[in-house]
Structures are given as structure tokens and as C-alpha cells.
Image (cartoon, coloured by chain):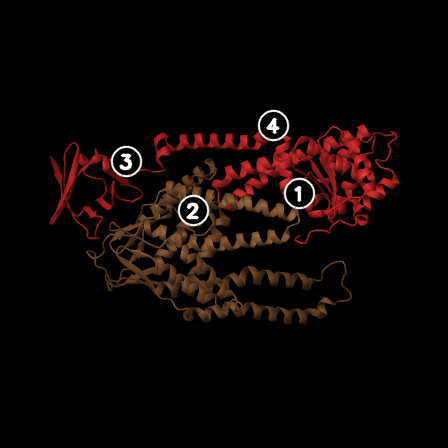
């Protein structure tokens, strides 16, 4: 049996009152006991001592099962005593075991692999998700769009003709005209495409609408909306560890860069379909040109392109312009009457509800 | 301990000591995609608490990263994931034309968030006290904070109804509610802050925007002749326009936060001065100038280091808090017996989810 103290540099709290004791410590191979005038604590086993980290120039130990029990030393504990003591945790148990730098390398590789998989996996997974699931998801999200779709018999014929020319073999469930004054078109989960009425009003010819519609059909064909949904879900889980703002920003940036690739692929599809259908790509190019001017001109767009989900309009305009073949006899996508029916669909449909009250 | 000239609280940390903790925390957070955040918080607190002296003995933080992580996971599963689904549901309802139901659901969700943020505030304090040890004794509360959540909701709403004039009352009475439910060892905290003591400052905060608005209108009116300059190029905004814009920006980003700070400085002095524990009376002597320098230092630190200095903010704030905190009165160590409150099993998940609590 060995002992040290009592000593000003050794103190003890028993966990029941705040009174400080200066005990004498006696120890053997399997444990130790504290004695002070009027009390003692022990015998305790070495294995029940828990180091309390972050205590500066002091060494403090707790006792498993007795909250508030503390044994403290100024500086390091006496040598014979110290050999029995566990080391305080520093970075965390796993990291302490393998070492900081090795842990950083390991975690770094794991993190990079995780992010890579989460970004890529949606492309691998999406093709295997049954269409029926996607359609049900789309129905749950959109339904009948609250009765805001415009349709007349003539507009239905016009849309059917566009669809036959641009995406005959694509699983499209519906191409609708939404009574919303925005220059936009969207592909929704479940093979639905919405052309906004604002787009039809803004377009100068059916060929422009054909280019935009073919782009959206490209999204449906590539199942881009579903892929984006899966990716968004994965990213929000993986980046959930960061606090809201950091995670949201990183998530947005990563998702955006992928959506730009999808946009380019949809443009490529659109260009190909226009060529097959013998529709001139030039009106679509002109349309992007007008859009680009609306969003502040090329320099403005380039400066913000890293955060935009669509490729800059100038790039898109060039791609469509280049695909035009000189001297080729293009024909219009729709007859004048069909085009009128499309543009006036919302005016002529008595049931169509107007716009969004909430937006 | 009074009369010895020394303050009851002291802080002995240095930023050089803390830097290795801060930087390894940052590195580990990056490579673990943020998950290390909880262990990082714990390491920081262990350091800060252990360098904080109260009378004769440093504080000790006994919280663990794992329990913070568990708190986070619980909140994620119980609240955040249902909220994501709710958000999707609300969007779907809007699309499908059930705007009324969507608004009701959304309003309910916001109300629930409001309630939960009150609960979070309470539970954060309770958790921190239950993990703070001094002389082997800890604090805590037997109240779980669900009732405080309602108190938080109705007092804040009542505070806002008469054009925000009762906000100081809501703030001080909620402070009292919160602290009166807390204890350290066998002693309950007593908080008796009076709203009247902060009203003068609050009225300053309340009235200055009106005075500024009047000032701006007068300035604008007197600048009118300049704005109407017939020789000016009509396509260019007049010089006066830019001057006005700069004045408005300075007011919004400079003057208003400054007044808010002046109010907050007074508020903190008042509420801490009204706080006592058994025979100990607390006080806090940070004046508006001190707060101003703290915030200015924060901004300079973050800007000059291109954001990396962010890792030192919790250190700076804790040091500020401790060096301005003081206590007077006697405390009997033998009467300071162990807390009998139930210690919460997990960390501050709710507070974490709402991004409250800076340290």
C-alpha cells in the first residue's frame, strides 16, 4: 500500500456538498481510498475513474456513478498514482484512438465520397424509379393545378400536334397551359409540362414555343425533375450537420451546378428535335436573345451565372443559331389558326381560373 | 469574498491557448460535413468553463458531444422532418387550389414554431446549468419548459399588440419566469427584474426611427429644388438621390442597430442586477460602449481574416460576459449541497435547430 497527502495540491469534492477536502490517498494494485478528517471515500477501482478534460494546469478526475465526485491535483498526479489513470479525451474517443491527422484524412475521404455519391446517385437511381411512383408524386404535388389550366378543343389539337412533332416517344402525360402571367415553362414530376400563358403572349411565333416546349420535353425524357428531387433530398440529409445557413448555401450551389448540366442536355435535345421536325431553331434563338436583354444583358448574366440554374441566354442563343442549316426549307411548327388557338386558349376557356392569389 | 477587491468571476484563458482548439474544430467540422459541430461545441465549452473562475474554483463543463448530437437527431426526427413534409403538403395544397387550408396549416406551423422556440430557450438554459459544475455541485431545473413555451407565446403577443410598447415588459417578465424556474445546488435562482428600469432606453429605441423619418422628410423637402433641377440629365438620377440613398443606408445599418445595442446593454445590466442565488447577488457592468467595441471587434476580426476569425467569436463573447459579470454576498459551502433536479438526457437540440444560443 502506498499513500500521498494530505496536501494543499490535492483536493476532493464528494458530490453531496460543496465543501472542499484535502484527502490522504492510499492505493493498491486494484484500487484506492481517500481519507480526510471526518470522512473517507472508497475503496474505488481504478477503472471507475473518469478524466475530466480541459482543466488547464490541473488534473481532475470524476468517479463513474457518483455525479459531482471529483479528485483534483495541481499539475500532474503523483507518479505512482498516475500510472493507473486513464488519459483525458481530447478530440473525441474515435479520433483520439486513430490520431488527429489520420482522422482528418479518413473523414475527408469519407466526406468527399459521400458528397460525390449523393450528387451522382440520383442519376443512377432515377431511371429505376417506376413511372407509376413518379406519376403519383406528381399528382400529389400538383393535382389539376387548382383549375388554372386553360383548354379549348382547338388548343388541345394544337398541343397534340406540337407533341407529335417534338416528343412522340416520350412519356408525357399532359402538356397544359397555365393561366399565369410569367414568361416561363416547367416540367413537373410525373411527365407533366406547363406552358405559362405569359410565355405564349410574349412569343412572336409558334416556332419559339416549339423550341421551349422541346426543351421541357427533354427534361421529361431525362427524368430531370425526379433526379433533382432525389438529389435535393440527399443533399439536405448529408448537409444537415451544418447549421441552417451554411448547409443551405452549399446545398444550393451544388444543386445549381448540376441543374445547369441538365439544362444544357435539355437544350441539346430541343435542338435535335427541332431539326428532325424540320422547324427552324432561329426563332428560339431570337427568343433567348430577348430573354437575355430582360435579365440585364450579357455582362450581368455572366457575372451571376454561377448562381443561376439556366445557362446564360447568350450561350443558348449561339447553340440554337449554330444549329440552323442555311438554305434549308423549314416549315412553321403550327398553322396560323392553330397558333391563334394556343395563344387565345385562356381567353376562350370560360372555366379557367386566373393566376395565383398567393403569389 | 466581498471587500477583498477581487471580482467574484475571472477569466484566465488566452486566445493563443484557444487557437489550437478553434482551428482543429474548424478542420474536423469541414471533413465531417458539419457533424463534428457538437463535439466542437463541447470542446470549446470545456475550455471556456475551465478558464472561468468563480471565487476560488474554476467552473467545469460536463456536457458531451454525443448528447448534443442525440438532441439534434431527436429534433430532426420529431420536428424538422415533419415540417419538411408539411411544407411540401402546403405547396401541393396551393397548387391544387386549396389556398385557405394551406394558409391555415402554414399559420398553425408558424405558431407551433413560435411556441417551440420559447421551449427551446428555456431548455437551453436548463441544459447548460445542468452541465455546469462548481465545487462538485451542479445546477438545473425540475421544470421541462413546456409551460414556459405558452408564457413565451402570450407575453410576446401581448407585448406586440399596443404597437410593440409592451415589449420590454415581455422581455423582463420572461427573463424572470425562466430564471425563477432554475436552481443551483439546493438554492433556487431569484429574478425580479422590472420593466420600468429599461423603459427610458426602450423609448429612445422606439422614438428615434420616427425622429429620423421626420428628419429625412424635412431633408428631402429642402432638397426638392435640387432634385427638380431642369438642366439635369433626366435619364440620370440626380445627385441628391444618391445622397439620400446613402443616408438611408447609414440609418438602417448603422444608427438603428446602434440604438438597439444601447437598449440591450441597459437591459442586460438591469436583468442581471435583479438576479440572485441564495445570498449571492449578481451584477453585470458592460456599458453601451463596451458592447459597441465588442461588436466592432467581432466585425473587424471576421472581415480581416476573410471569415476564419468566426471561430473565435464564441471565445470573445464568453470572455466579455465573464469579465463584466460580478457577484457579491456570502456563500456557505457546506450548505451548498448537490442538486436534486433531474438532469436532461440530451442536449440543446431545439435551440440548435432554431439557431439560438451563441456559445
Q: Nearer the viewer, residue B234 or B134?
A: B134
Label 1 is found on which chain of the structure?
Answer: A
Q: Residue at x 76, y 58 (%)?
A: B235
- Residue hosting label 1: A143
**Could you confirm whether marks 2 and 1 are on the same chain?**
no
**Element type at marker 4?**
helix
Label 3 is found on which chain of the structure?
Answer: A
- Above-or-below relation of A46 to A150: above
* Separation of marks 4 and 1 at Cα, in angstroms: 24 Å
| Lower sequence index among marks 4 and 3 | 3
| Lower sequence index among marks 3 and 1 | 3
- Residue hosting label 2: B349
**Could you confirm whether marks 4 and 1 are on the same chain?**
yes
Report whether B337 appears left or right of A206: left
- Above-or-below relation of B252 to A292: below
Question: Chain B appears what colour?
Answer: brown
**Element type at marker 3?**
loop
Q: Residues within 10 Å of mark 2 (few under 14, many from 20)?
A: many
**Could you confirm whether marks 2 and 3 are on the same chain?**
no
Q: Nearer the viewer, residue B100 or B287?
A: B100
Q: Residues within 10 Å of mark 3 (few under 14, many from 20)?
A: few
Quadrant housing residue A316: top right
- Above-or-below relation of B238 to B90: below
Asked whether disc 4 touches disc 1, contact meaning CB atoms under 8 Å apart, the reply is no
| Lower sequence index among marks 4 and 1 | 4
Q: Residue B33's spot in the image, x, y percent? A: 48, 37
Q: Residues within 10 Å of mark 4 (few under 14, many from 20)?
A: few
Amino acid at each position: 500500500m502506498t499513500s500521498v497527502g494530505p496536501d494543499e495540491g490535492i483536493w476532493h469534492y464528494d458530490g453531496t456538498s460543496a465543501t472542499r477536502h484535502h484527502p490522504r490517498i492510499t492505493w493498491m494494485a486494484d484500487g484506492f481510498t481517500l481519507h480526510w478528517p471526518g470522512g473517507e471515500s472508497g475503496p474505488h477501482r481504478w477503472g471507475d475513474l473518469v478524466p475530466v478534460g480541459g482543466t488547464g494546469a490541473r488534473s481532475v478526475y470524476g468517479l463513474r456513478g457518483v455525479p459531482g465526485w471529483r479528485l483534483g491535483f495541481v499539475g500532474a498526479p503523483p507518479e505512482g498514482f498516475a500510472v493507473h489513470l486513464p488519459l483525458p479525451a481530447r478530440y473525441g474517443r474515435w479520433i483520439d484512438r486513430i490520431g488527429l491527422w489520420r482522422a482528418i484524412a479518413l473523414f475527408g475521404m469519407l466526406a468527399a465520397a459521400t458528397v460525390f455519391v449523393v450528387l451522382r446517385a440520383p442519376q443512377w437511381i432515377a431511371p429505376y424509379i417506376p413511372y407509376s411512383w413518379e406519376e403519383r408524386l406528381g399528382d400529389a404535388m400538383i393535382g389539376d393545378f387548382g383549375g388554372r389550366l386553360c383548354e379549348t378543343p382547338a388548343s388541345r389539337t394544337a398541343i397534340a400536334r406540337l407533341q407529335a412533332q417534338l416528343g412522340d416517344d416520350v412519356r408525357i402525360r399532359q402538356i397544359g397551359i397555365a393561366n399565369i402571367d410569367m414568361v416561363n415553362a416547367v416540367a413537373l414530376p410525373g411527365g407533366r409540362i406547363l406552358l405559362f400563358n405569359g410565355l405564349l403572349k410574349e412569343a412572336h411565333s409558334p416556332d419559339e414555343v416549339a423550341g421551349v416546349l422541346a426543351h421541357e420535353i427533354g427534361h421529361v425524357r431525362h427524368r430531370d425533375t425526379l433526379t433533382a428531387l432525389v438529389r435535393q433530398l440527399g443533399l439536405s440529409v448529408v448537409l444537415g450537420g451544418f447549421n441552417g445557413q451554411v448547409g443551405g448555401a452549399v446545398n444550393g450551389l451544388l444543386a445549381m451546378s448540376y441543374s445547369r448540366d441538365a439544362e444544357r442536355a435539355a437544350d441539346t435535345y430541343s435542338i435535335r428535335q427541332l431539326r428532325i421536325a424540320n422547324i427552324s431553331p432561329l426563332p428560339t434563338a431570337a427568343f433567348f436573345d430577348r430573354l437575355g436583354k430582360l435579365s440585364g444583358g450579357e455582362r450581368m448574366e455572366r457575372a451571376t451565372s454561377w448562381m443561376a440554374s439556366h445557362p446564360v441566354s447568350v450561350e443558348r442563343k449561339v447553340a440554337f443559331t449554330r444549329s440552323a442549316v442555311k438554305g434549308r426549307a423549314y416549315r412553321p411548327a403550327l398553322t396560323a389558326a392553330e397558333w391563334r388557338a394556343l395563344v387565345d386558349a385562356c381567353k376562350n376557356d370560360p372555366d379557367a381560373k386566373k393566376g395565383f392569389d398567393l403569389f | 469574498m466581498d471587500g477583498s477587491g477581487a471580482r467574484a468571476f475571472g477569466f484566465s484563458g488566452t486566445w493563443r491557448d484557444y487557437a489550437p482548439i478553434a482551428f482543429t474544430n474548424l478542420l474536423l467540422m469541414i471533413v465531417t460535413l458539419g457533424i463534428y459541430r457538437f463535439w466542437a461545441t463541447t470542446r470549446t465549452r470545456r475550455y471556456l468553463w475551465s478558464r472561468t473562475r468563480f471565487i476560488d474554483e474554476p467552473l467545469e463543463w460536463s456536457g458531451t458531444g454525443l448528447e448534443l448530437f442525440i438532441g439534434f437527431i431527436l429534433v430532426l426526427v420529431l420536428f424538422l422532418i415533419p415540417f419538411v413534409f408539411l411544407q411540401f403538403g402546403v405547396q401541393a395544397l396551393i397548387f391544387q387550389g386549396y389556398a385557405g387550408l394551406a394558409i391555415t396549416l402554414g399559420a398553425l406551423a408558424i405558431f407551433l414554431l413560435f411556441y417551440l422556440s420559447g421551449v427551446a430557450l428555456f431548455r437551453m438554459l436548463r441544459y447548460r446549468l445542468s452541465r455546469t459544475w462548481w465545487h462538485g455541485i451542479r445546477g438545473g431545473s425540475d421544470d421541462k419548459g413546456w409551460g414556459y413555451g405558452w408564457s413565451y407565446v402570450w407575453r410576446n403577443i401581448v407585448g406586440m399588440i399596443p404597437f410593440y410598447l409592451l415589449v420590454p415588459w415581455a422581455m423582463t417578465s420572461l427573463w424572470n419566469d425562466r430564471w425563477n424556474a432554475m436552481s443551483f445546488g439546493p438554492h433556487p435562482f431569484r429574478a425580479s427584474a422590472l420593466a420600468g428600469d429599461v423603459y427610458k432606453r426602450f423609448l429612445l429605441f422606439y422614438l428615434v426611427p420616427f425622429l429620423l423619418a421626420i428628419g429625412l422628410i424635412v431633408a428631402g423637402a429642402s432638397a426638392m429644388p435640387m432634385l427638380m433641377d431642369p438642366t439635369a440629365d433626366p435619364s440620370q438620377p440626380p445627385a441628391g438621390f444618391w445622397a439620400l440613398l446613402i443616408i438611408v443606408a447609414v440609418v438602417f445599418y448603422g444608427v438603428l442597430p446602434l440604438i438597439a445595442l444601447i437598449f440591450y446593454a441597459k437591459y442586460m445590466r438591469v436583468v442581471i442586477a435583479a438576479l440572485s442565488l441564495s445570498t449571492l447577488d449578481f451584477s453585470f457592468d458592460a456599458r453601451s460602449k463596451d458592447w459597441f467595441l465588442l461588436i466592432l471587434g467581432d466585425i473587424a476580426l471576421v472581415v480581416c481574416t476573410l471569415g476564419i476569425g468566426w471561430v473565435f467569436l464564441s471565445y470573445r463573447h464568453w470572455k466579455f460576459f465573464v469579465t463584466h459579470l460580478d457577484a457579491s454576498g456570502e456563500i456557505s459551502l457546506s450548505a451548498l449541497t448537490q442538486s436534486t433536479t433531474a438532469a436532461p438526457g440530451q442536449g440543446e437540440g431545439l435551440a440548435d435547430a432554431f439557431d439560438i444560443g451563441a456559445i
